Image (cartoon, rainbow, N blue to C red):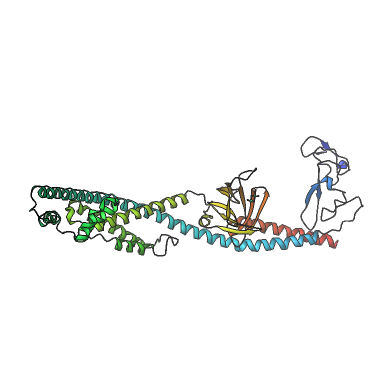
Amino acid sequence: MIKCKNGSKLFTKTQLNDDFCDCPDGTDEPGTSACPGGKFYCKNVGHFPSLLYSSRVNDGICDCCDGSDEYDGKVKCPNTCNKAGKVAIESLKRKMEVYQEGVALRKQEIEQAKRAIARGKAELSALEKEREAVGKLVSQLTELVRKLEQGHQENEDEMRGAQNEKVENEKSGPEENADSQTSEVEKKWQSNESPPDQNEKDGDESSEGLSREELGQLVASRWTGKKTGVQVKEIDQAKNDQENGGRDAGYKESEADNASHQSWLNKIQETAQNFLNMFSAPVANLDSNQIWKDYNDYTAKLSDIDSRISSLTGKFKHDFGKENEFYLFYDRCFEFEQDKYVYKVCPFKDAKQKGGNSETLLGKWVEFGNSYRLMRFTDGDVCWNGPDRHLKVKLRCGLKTELTGMDEPSRCEYAALMYTPILCLDEKLEEFKQKLESMNQVQEQGLNHEEL
Ligand code: MAN
């Protein structure tokens, strides 16, 4: 006795394929259509065996390549298994060739990603050090600017006092001439070592409508004291040398670059020391022009550093795959033109549909799915009377990373296909090798079968 697959009943050998259904799961009738919902087994010698629904048995259509599903003689099905096997082998071989090359490309990409990650991390840690140093400079400069403003205020008060004195003098005696008044003001300026010229004085007279910064610069223009020794340009140059190759080239790891970065940091520290010395100097000795310039330059620098840090930190929060194999996708977008639209997919960001002058958001990046074989974008633009637009991008092994198809299977639900070496997995290639081996064996059996 034989047990039905689900264990519910038993049947004898003679009941096997006797065109009467004994097992509810159809185990006793794999070769007939007696069991509803049962499966018919095609041996397909020369190719791969397959299962088909019993309802397709003796329905007048040849489903199995060996023709075994049409045994009632109504139609004659030729055996095409050897031919089909050969075609399948050829197609598998082509696929394996792509994988072979793709696996190598994938490895290269992973190596490249590793280097880029190391550069990014080095850049981040250097930026954090820079942030600390430049942050200190900015607070010192803020203090110095405050000191300048205070000095300016004191000067103005003194000047106003002198002006009032003059008015008082004019009131009390007309013989007090303009010369004596000028000399009073002049004296005030002389206390600052270097008198302003007439134009600058004029500027001061109309200084009311000026911003704090412009005011500061106006004050600055009155002094022509010695240089502070703060040479932002030079520092910038050192920094530029270190960054040579641009942001995309990333942060260099070589010793020379580290040394250059270190020397840049040293310069910042020297600069900070210079600023410290300035705190004790009299306002009159300060080069306010330079201080304002440094203040503006370093504040801008600090905000650049902050935004770079935040963009790098944001980047490193993403999941780039088990081997960070998708890291280099971060700054890339892929386009595909179909019908009246150009589709633009930017992994880790968003996907858009562009047509004419309008742009529709198909979705924002969410995550990978299906073991990194799918990219998901959701929360796109609302679809009238439909769901919010969303997109799934299926990933397949290919020698080039490219979008090759876009479909809208249901309104506002988009499905794309992307080929990339990243999906050419070594273990898949191994699987194909084994499959090819067994296909070759089956093919041999088929040929022997034919000879018989
Ligand atoms: C636009 C496109 C289409 C979409 C319709 C839905 O025309 O985004 O893809 O099907 O809107 O109204």
| Image-quadrant location for residue 202 | bottom left
**Quadrant in the picture for the C terminus:** bottom right
Residue 285 located left or right of residue 114? left
**Quadrant in the picture for the N terminus:** top right
The front one of 217 and 377 is 217
Residue 224: x and y in percent read 20, 60
Residue 268 located left or right of residue 428? left
The image shows residue 239, relative to residue 29, as above or below, that is below
| Image-quadrant location for residue 259 | bottom left
Residue drawn 14% across the image and 58% down it: 193
Residue drawn 31% across the image and 60% down it: 264
The furthest residue to the top: 8
Tell how many labels: 0
Q: Would you say residue 387 is visible in this rendering?
A: yes
| Image-quadrant location for residue 267 | bottom left
Residue 281: x and y in percent read 17, 53
Residue drawn 78% across the image and 52% down it: 49
Residue 344: x and y in percent read 58, 56
The front one of 132 and 257 is 132
Residue 210: x and y in percent read 29, 52
The front one of 152 and 303 is 152
Q: Would you say residue 270 is visible in this rendering?
A: no
Residue 262 located left or right of residue 103? left
Residue drawn 40% across the image and 56% down it: 123
The furthest residue to the front: 174
